[in-house]
């Protein structure tokens, strides 16, 4: 890990889980060293790097968490139940609504009524 450049998230997406963990560890140790230098009264040019390091750590953690959630979604895709944190959030009322399939169901009597008496279409001829 170069100690001058920021971590680009585009370069992180292709990396494996182990590579990301190793990079995260390196960034955290570097941040720890800079914090010690800050207390000891180090050069201010290095202390400005603390901000970039914290943001880089956040980027790496974001990619790790996104990959983890993606793999969990794949694992639970064929299962009957989804974990609560992977389900759609929405609002409580929306979650309790009938499913679209149940909402579109019609009784046999209503089905006959709609087929025998459809909505009539009328056109009124304009007078010239």
Image (cartoon, rainbow, N blue to C red):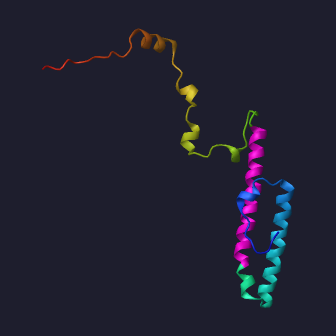
Judge left or right: residue 105 versus residue 50: left
Q: Is residue 75 magenta?
A: yes
Judge left or right: residue 110 versus residue 9: left
Task: Locate the N terminus by quadrant.
Answer: bottom right
Judge left or right: residue 86 versus residue 32: left
**Where in the figure is residue 76, as x and y percent of width and height?**
76, 38
**Where in the figure is residue 88, as x and y percent of width and height?**
63, 43
Q: Which residues are magenta?
A: 49-76
Q: 49 and 69: which one is in front? A: 49
Count every numbered label the image shows and give the total: 0
**Where in the figure is residue 106, as x and y percent of width and height?**
51, 19
Which residue: 58% across, 31% down? 99
Which residue: 76% across, 75% down? 4
Q: 50 and 10: which one is in front? A: 10
Main SS, magenta region, reads: helix
Which residue: 17% across, 20% down? 126
**Where in the figure is residue 48, as x and y percent of width and height?**
70, 81
Q: 20 and 87: which one is in front? A: 20
């Amino acid at each position: 890990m170069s100690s001058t450049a920021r971590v680009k998230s585009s370069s992180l997406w292709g990396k494996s889980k182990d590579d990301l963990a190793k990079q995260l560890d390196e960034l955290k140790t570097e941040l720890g060293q800079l914090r010690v230098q800050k207390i000891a009264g180090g050069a201010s040019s290095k202390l400005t790097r603390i901000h970039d390091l914290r943001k880089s750590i956040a980027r790496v953690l974001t990619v790790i968490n996104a990959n983890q959630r993606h793999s969990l979604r794949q694992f639970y895709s064929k299962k009957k139940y989804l974990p609560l944190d992977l389900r759609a959030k929405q609002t409580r009322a929306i979650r309790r609504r009938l499913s679209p399939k149940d909402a579109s169901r019609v009784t046999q009597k209503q089905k006959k009524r709609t087929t025998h008496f459809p909505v009539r279409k009328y056109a009124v001829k304009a007078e010239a």
